[in-house]
Image (spheres, rainbow, N blue to C red):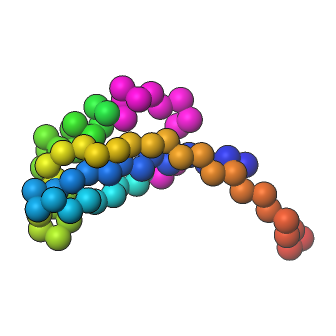
Amino acid sequence: MASFKIVMNFKDTMGKNSTMTIADAKPTVTQAAAMAAMDAILAADVFRPGNVALATKVDCKLVETTVSDFYDAA
């Protein structure tokens, strides 16, 4: 079964990179929607890793993971 997550990378005002992951993303999410989410995160200014404000977008990816379960305990 495949699962999807969005991995967003930001640079803070001190020049350090920070990563934010959104689990259980829809596989149909668009690049435009992901970029809009990053813009909203920056505009809201509520995430401050290490008490430092996020400043710019660095990267954003939709990651698909497929898990094959080989063990059935039943």
Residue 12, image quadrant: bottom left
Give residue 46's position: percent from left, percent from top.
15, 54
Give residue 55's position: percent from left, percent from top.
14, 49
Q: 53 or 13, which lies in front?
A: 13
Q: 18 or 22, which lies in front?
A: 18
- Give the residue drawn at x 10%, y 56%: 13
Residue 44, image quadrant: top left
* Direction from residue 36 to residue 3 in the image, left or right: right
Give residue 70's position: percent from left, percent from top.
85, 65
- Give the residue drawn at x 25%, y 43%: 57
Q: Does residue 46 appear in the picture of this structure?
A: no
Question: Which residues lie in the magenta part?
Answer: 23-34
- Looking at this rendering, what residue extends furthest in the bottom direction? 73
Q: 25 or 34, which lies in front?
A: 34
Q: Main secondary structure of the magenta part?
A: loop
Give residue 60's position: percent from left, percent from top.
38, 43
- Looking at this rendering, what residue extends furthest in the right direction? 74
* Direction from residue 27 to residue 20 in the image, left or right: left
- Looking at this rendering, what residue extends furthest in the front direction? 15
